Amino acid sequence: MRDAFGTDGCVLVLGATSDIAAATVRELAASGTRAMTLTARQTADLAPLVDELSEQGVTCRTIELDVAATATVGPTLDDLFADVDYDLVLCAIGVLDDDERHLEDSDAAYSTITGTFAGPALAVLAAARGLRSQGHGTLATITSVAAIRPRAGVALYGGAKAGLDFLARGLRPTLREHGVRVLVIRPGFVHTRMTEGLSPAPLSTDPESVARDIVRSLRRSRTVVWTPRLLRPMFAVLRLLPSPVWNRLAAR
């Protein structure tokens, strides 16, 4: 990633109010990044993070971006790339809800589809377009291990994340030709505001650990980040399990 850890690099974070995004922003600042553009549905929510970063000498720009307003996503990002050359775009947008609610409430289902796939997908495509025009940079997209195999209770969320994971990986060959790297990030269960009250899955982790894994991977030539790293060999086995066995394990 060209200059992204130096004083000349600039980072664009989509969904900067998420706990993982905020932790990653702090890790990037500690690594030397001094210019960031942070987006959120309401920029006022970013004020504490911006104040913290400013004290560390980071110049921050905040932009309102609501991916539920799908018609505005592409134009907003196009305008950002017209003004700034970005070395890293991190997409950290998603909505978590349970299938029971989705079955009873079509609006809740639509919100999950829009907030976890449709909106983020449009943002990823717009970022890919901007980075391709620049001829360099890294597009990092946070998906989930929930995208790997269907699981009762989070079927819609997992399906939406699977679509985003598939999209990002599908863009990789084209973007590589233009000097752009694509990094897919697959966290397991992370203790955040979004997962508060849920029963932790095995190998659960925290936003700070995920952020360290992300930044460490940005320094290397990886294309997929499993965080924590033990999830990679674990899911290599879980992918091969017969569906009845998987369904019993996933229900625990």
Image (cartoon, rainbow, N blue to C red):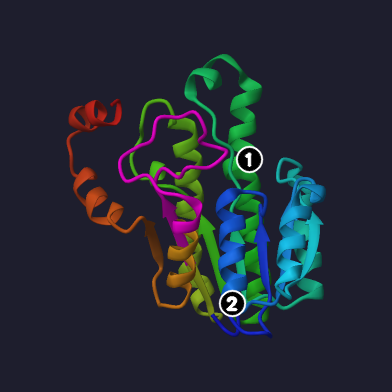
Q: Is residue 76 above or below residue 27?
A: above
Residue 40, relative to residue 6: is it above or below?
above
Please provide the residue range marked out in magenta: 183-209
Query: Would you say the magenta stretch is mainly helix, strand or loop?
Result: loop
Q: Which residue is mark 2?
A: 137
Residue found at x 56% / y 62%: 24
Question: Hey, which quadrant is residue 81 in on the image?
Answer: bottom right
Q: Camera-side residue: 20 or 92? A: 20
Q: Is residue 184 left or right of residue 127?
A: left
Which residue is the extreme one toward the top? 104
Of the 4 image quadrants, the one containing the C terminus is top left
x, y percent for residue 59: 77, 73
Sooner in the amino-acid sequence: mark 2 or mark 1: 1
Q: CA distance from mark 2 to mark 1?
A: 25 Å
Relative horizontal placement of residue 206, taking residue 245 as reference (left or right): right
Residue 184 within the magenta-colored segment of the rendering: yes
Q: Position of residue 227 (x, y in %)?
A: 38, 56
Q: Amino acid at mark 2?
A: Gly
Circle 1 SS class: helix
Q: Residue at x 56, y 76 (%)?
A: 31
- Residue ID for mark 1: 115
